[in-house]
Image: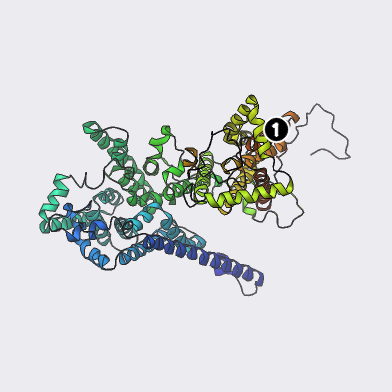
Amino acid sequence: MANVEHGGTAGNAFGAGAAESARARLRAIRIGLWAIAAVLAIRQVAVVLSTPKGDRLTDLETWVGPNGVLHVKGSLYDSTQFTGTPFGGFVLKPLTRAAEQALGWGWTFGSLSLVVVLGLVVARALPQPVSRRTALLAAPVAISLLMLSLPVRNALYLGQTSIIPVLLVLLGCFAVRGERASGLLIGVAAALQPTMLVFAPLLWFTGRRRAVESTAITFAGLTALAWAVMPHDSHTYWVHHLGGVGLGGAADDLSNQSLHGALLRLGLNGSLEITLFLSLGAAVAAVGLRRAIRYARDGQLLLAVAVTGCVAVAVSPTSWQHQLLWVLLALVGRVGRKTSDRYMWPVAVVLVMTLPAKMMLPNMAALFPLRDNVVLLAALAAAMIVPFLSRTSEYYRAPIPTDYARPVPTRWRRVPLFPFLGRVFTRPNLLLELLLIRVGYSAYQQVRLAATGGTNAGGRTTAEHHGEQVLSIERFLHIDIEHWVNHTVFRVEWLRDFFDFYYESFHFVVPLTVLGVLYARRPGDYRWARSALGFATLIALVGFWLFPLAPPRLMPGLGIIDTVHGAQDFSKPDYGTLTALTNQYAAMPSLHFGWSLWCGVVIAVLAPKWWMKALGLLHPLFTVSAIVATGNHWVLDAVGGAAVVGAGFGLTYLLQGPRPRPLMRPVEVSTKDPVPVTGRTPS
């Protein structure tokens, strides 16, 4: 495109037409991305303003509530949960009073505008050189990611001011001219949030010493001004609480993603915890700032600023959830020599910063320390561990390309519909795969609950009505065998125990085992099988959402015995403890049978021995018998499960093409073997 723009000629009609087509596509993509950013912004505002007054902008109540800053006559810290600096209280009072008059509208739209400006500054600060495509698309992508991030969503929902210090630092580093103006903005940010002083070493060791002087003078001057105007409050903040430590909520709260909060959650306290916190904080600061200085000298100033911000997150006594934007900015760093590895770090950061920790990791006690500190761990990784590439590296702009499998001829000219999804034989990144599997399963759980309005009893009437419809269809087709199979199996104790065990034990074990074996032994086939399973599950989620269905065991008057969970009390909205854990009305389609059928198909296609194929096909047979015998599914649920699995394989074929065949290794011909006569000398 650059050649066409700068070196093309009027006579090259074909080249001009291709360039114009490329520009049109780029323009359409850009418009689409800006539309997405606008929709996300509107949605965030709508969420805030549609929430009842008592539940939204709760931190703004710190200012405007009956016991807030604006209504107390004594100290700022006599109000409810105010944790800012005295200068912050002094300078933000007028803005807050205006927001009080606008009932939160001004505060919400003002914060939204700051997010947009922040995204524009980040897009402008990308390390050079960047392509024209990246320059045009960076701003809407950055704004969209910011809108989706938990820190921005919390700041908008709670009515926080945490976006302001981040924006001031970025403006000081990238938007203003002159070191003194830069230091002035960073000094104001430090006066609002003292941990921003951690940027002073970055400025000093990268040659911007006048900016450091300006930062120090501005911070000291504004703090002294606040001390002169509010001496009692300043003494409370800086002396009594040592820079605000202990103000606000409990430091061991899950929202505090700092080293101090993590150590308190691990059960440490007193002098031991303080000593350990100071030691670890000093180590993180030393290593992180050294890395940040190196990246700044390398020309990656935005990455250097993000790494320094991650250091601030870790070493601050309190880093509340709405103050963690620095971690999201760290995704600008490039990691990995291979193209296939290049997206691992950005995707991991986006998942951590946009999804609750409970969706990232299973609800297991052994994983609670990891789950409760996942954002802190991401900040520590960015500050100390992740090997971001230098711009001088040969892989920075030209990573090792992915070797795609040779296209397989098909009848349909448009297969695959998206060539960039073409299958490769190389093994995908394990961390990224595990993250996506976990997020996919969490989405599956959330949709199951959302299908009944977030409560198990919410969709009971609708689900039972749908159950009657399914039963009438089965009676018409003469396949209503659930009652007969259930009671027959119940009378045979060993058969009942077998199906109960099979139903409870193999639903997750077998698919995960198949995926694990394919990942280790057949990575190309792993991608094919994993995609089919993912598409099938996504389609099933639509079914759960649109058609909540009561299984036979939860249909009053049908007489089905729940062999797995025990007798159900139909007089209660919830049928015992099991329904308190998950939505029992996600029966159509049956993923119990769907996943087992997927396993059977994959094993039958890929297994090298006939007996392995036979065992693989026995799994869906036993599963469909178990789900009907235990009263957990209708026969038509299994039909639905088979349909979504078929659709999953079909979508995989359409989007990625046929399953690629393994590359055949060349046969080495022994020099001792006679060379066939071909009429020419072998080359």
- Kind of element beneath mark 1: helix
Q: Can residue 619 be seen?
A: yes
358 relative position to 494: left or right: left
| Crowd around label 1: few <14 · some 14–19 · many ≥20 (10 Å) | some
| Residue labelled with disc 1 | 618
Closer to us: 375 or 308? 375
Q: Left or right: 570 with respect to 252?
A: right
The quarter of the picture where the N terminus appears is bottom right
Q: Where, by quadrant of the figure, is residue 211 drawn?
A: bottom left
**Who is closer to the viewer here, 224 or 433?**
433
| Image x and y of residue 326, in percent | 36, 51
Q: Quadrant of residue 146?
A: bottom left
Q: Amino acid at mark 1?
A: Leu
Q: Where's residue 483, x and y in %?
A: 66, 38
Task: Name the residue rendered at 17%, 58% in the picture.
Answer: 222
Residue 260 image-quadrant placement = top left
Seen at 30% across and 36% down, the residue is: 263
